Image (cartoon, grey):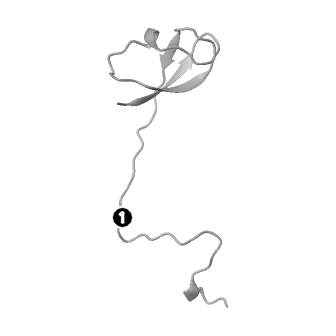
Amino acid sequence: MPMYDYTCTTCNNTFEELVYSSTVPDEDITCPKCGENKSKRQLCAPMISTKSTSYSPTPSGGCNSSSGFS
């Protein structure tokens, strides 16, 4: 089920909505702030993740022991 961003044209509230089908009309999406059914789906970029086996993050706040500092 995709998550879409919507903006209410009545109160200008921006919110996310889990939509069961991409064919659900915008008029069926209710704004959680004002309760109106006057929302428009926003254009948003897809979330992209990369999987790499060579990258290993170090804990924040620490230094790598081979950095030359003691």
The residue singled out by tag 1 in the image is 52
Image: 65 above or below 6:
below
Q: What type is the residue that disc 1 sits on?
A: Ser
Image: 67 above or below 6:
below
x, y percent for residue 9: 58, 12
Q: Quadrant of the C terminus?
A: bottom right
Please give left or right for residue 38 compared with residue 46 in the image.
Answer: right
x, y percent for residue 65: 57, 86
Image: 63 above or below 29:
below
x, y percent for residue 24: 36, 15
Please give left or right for residue 49 compared with residue 36 in the image.
Answer: left
Rendered residue at 46%/32% (across/down): 44
x, y percent for residue 2: 37, 31
Please give left or right for residue 16 compared with residue 1 in the image.
Answer: right
The image quarter containing residue 22 is top left
Mark 1, secondary structure of its residue: loop
Q: Quadrant of the N terminus?
A: top left
Between 45 and 34, the one lying in front of the other is 34
Please give left or right for residue 35 compared with residue 4 in the image.
Answer: right
